Each structure stands twice: as C-alpha cells, then as structure tokens.
Amino acid sequence: MWEKDVNINQIQEIRVKTNVFFGVGAIAKIEDIAADLKKKGIDKVIVISGKNAYKVTGAWDYVEKALNNNGIGYINYAKVTPNPTTAAIDEATSMAKEFGAKAVIAIGGGSPIDTGKSVAILMEYPEKTAAELYEWKFPAEKAAPIVAINLTHGTGTEVNRFAVATLLEKNFKPAIAYDCIYPSYSIDDPQLMTKLSKNQTMYTSIDAVNHVIEGATSKVASPYAVTLAKETIRLVAKYLPKALENLEDPEPRYYLLYASLLGGVGFDNGMLHYTHALEHPLSAVKPELSHGLGLAMLLPAVIKAIYADKAATLADILEPIAPGLQGTPDEAEKAAKLVEKWLFEVGVTQKLADDGFCDGDVDKLVDLCFTTPSLDLLLSLAPNEATKDVVKTIYEESMTPYNK
C-alpha cells in the first residue's frame, strides 16, 4: 500500500485550484503566506474564526506571529458558530469594512471558512447583504483574497468554490458556488486536528464520504470523481477506526485529512445531490444538528434510492464499507443495510427519530428541499428523477434503522 512510503512530516504542496500546504507542521507555512500577502500590498486582514478552536489548536499562535512579523494589521471576528448565519456574515463584513481589511484569513472547519468566503465576496460588494448573496440575488464575480487554515477533516471547503450559510428567518440553508472564492492558499495540518472530539472525528469523516458518494454518482460525475471516491472511502474505512482509538495520533488524522481533501476536490468536480440537499433543511430547522450527523442519518436511504441507477459505481466505491456487492440493481436494500451497518460500527447509531424529528416534519422538510435557493440544482443532478415522492421516502426511511 502506498501509505507505507509516505513521510507524514514532509510538507508537500498539492496543486488543485488552490495551493495547499499539506502535512504535519504545515501551519508554519503561514509565515510565507503572510509575506506574500504583504508583497501584494495587503497590510490589513480580517481573521474569521470560532470562539475557541483557533486558539486551542495552536493555530493562532503561528498566525498572529506571522502577521506581526510582516507588519500586517488584523481584526478578529471570533463568533462563528456551527451552521453559520447570514446575520453573522453581515456582522463580520461590517467589521472588515470599518477596519479597512483587504483580505480574509479563515481559521476553522467548514463554518469559519465558509463564513470567510462569504465575507470576502461582500467586501467587494459593499452595497449587498449576505441574504442577497445566499438567495442568489446577484452573481459574485470577485472576492477579496482568502487564506484558509483548516481545522477539520471533512468539509473540503479549503480546496473548492462552495460555501453554505443559514437564513434563520426562512429556515433556508442554501449553498453558493463561485470561482472567486477558491482560497488563494490553504493549510492542511493534521496536527491541528488532534484535539477534535470523538463525535467531531466521526461526523467530519462521514461528511467526506458523502461528498464523494454524491460526486461519483451525479449526472455530471466523471471518471476523476469516481477515482477520488474510491480512494476517499478506502482511507476513511481504514483510518477512522484508528483515529477513534487514539484521538491524538497525527498519523490517522493525516490520511483522514487527505481523504477530506480528495472529497472536496471530488464534489468540486462531480457536484452533490440528494444527501446534501436533504440534510440542509435538517440543520436549518435544527441549527444545533451537526452537518455530518445529518448526512449519516440520511445516507443509507439515499443509497437505496439511487442504487439501481448507479449499481456498478456504488458496488465498486463502497467495497471498503459495504463488501460483497455485485453491482446489480436488485441489491439496493442490501447496499443500504451494509452502509448503515458500517455507520453503526464506527459509532454513528442515531437516526432522525433519535434527534427529535418525526413523520409530521416530513412535508415541511420536503418543501424546504424544493424552495431553498440552490437545493433544486443539487436535486436536478441526482442520478434519477428527484421527485417530491422520492425525497419524502428518503426522509421517512431515515427515521429509524433498516437493521433492526
């Protein structure tokens, strides 16, 4: 296996659309990044983060030192929460404009990085609001430079053009996708992820798995997306149990982070469909719900819904977590049960009913799938026709386990 030849302490530059510094110790590269920003005339930045992780991980020590060493002024918006809101984006944008920031440094998982991407757009469109951005009221063609320092191994947002935010008043959780929000630089340092809890470790890794399953089975899936999916799922199946055994070991984090990076590139190429389109209403209605957990609760029913249309692809890419599938359309229920069995084995046993959802919520959730901006696009990319009846069935079958 190729992993035996890898020195995880060697910092490598991986070129996708974004330049990524990858490996244990990569956070030190922020010094070079700050120097490059200063050379380009950027003397003030806004740092976007959550309340604690950017400091607890040690990332902030490096960032603050690099900014000071290069004479770059900064202001810190440290109030990003899971499932970030448009109100928070507007608040951070206001701070950035008042301070005169010329670039964004986002430190965290998907929520701070997505917030940072959104702020970067609005810095270039000062007359617009985050609600207008996420309701697709204007096309974003420019954004301030973005540096992403990633603290989780699941989102993939550090290497792609996507961002997500919630409009609380409408229970909308749309996505945006613009070329202008590819980060100029990203840092993927697995040492920064050794403080993730057991649940965060599980949920973020499952997010990566969902990215590639959808990316490999969409209407626009390419062989590249399928190749990325196979390796992503293999790595998560192998290294997630190892990470859960020893949360502070950077080696399994390295491979989970690489899987996440592949997943981010995978859905940047193959896009997403059912699982993300159906999860966004869940965490829009219940903002405290972890995105990765919502995806995990839905995934088996999504596999069952699409299996007949992508049986060969799914049998191939799912082999590490659902072994023995032959790739025939009649295996849909078997495939769903095998995937659910794997999820339970790694510790994710919750279904929608366990998290407070009930059959009475289904019609509202279905409606949000078809009325939330951008989710109709995701549904249109599903390998079969994404009717309201299909979506309703996925929600209903995700309420309780298949394996009883």
Image (tube, rainbow, N blue to C red):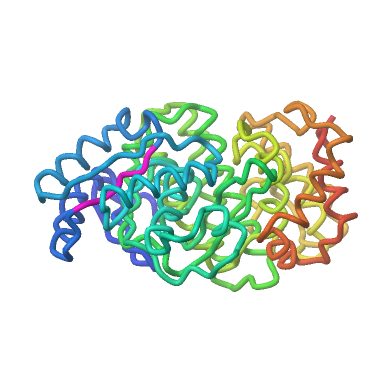
Q: Main secondary structure of the magenta part?
A: strand
In the image, 275: left or right of 11?
Answer: right
Is residue 222 shown above or below 401?
below
Which of 29/130 is in front?
130
Residue 16: percent from left, percent from top: 39, 67
For residue 14, say whether it is visible.
Answer: no
**Residue bounds of the magenta highlight:** 44-49
Seen in the image, is 235 located left or right of residue 388? left
Residue in view at x 33 percent, y 35 percent: 54
* 119 within the magenta span: no
Q: Is residue 300 left or right of residue 127?
A: right
Query: Vertically, is 299 above or below 348?
Result: below
How many numbered circles does the render carry?
0
In the displayed structure, would residue 374 be above or below residue 26? below
| Residue 66 image position (x, y, % from top left) | 15, 45
Residue 261 location in percent, x, y? 44, 55
Q: State the image quarter where residue 216 is shown.
A: bottom right
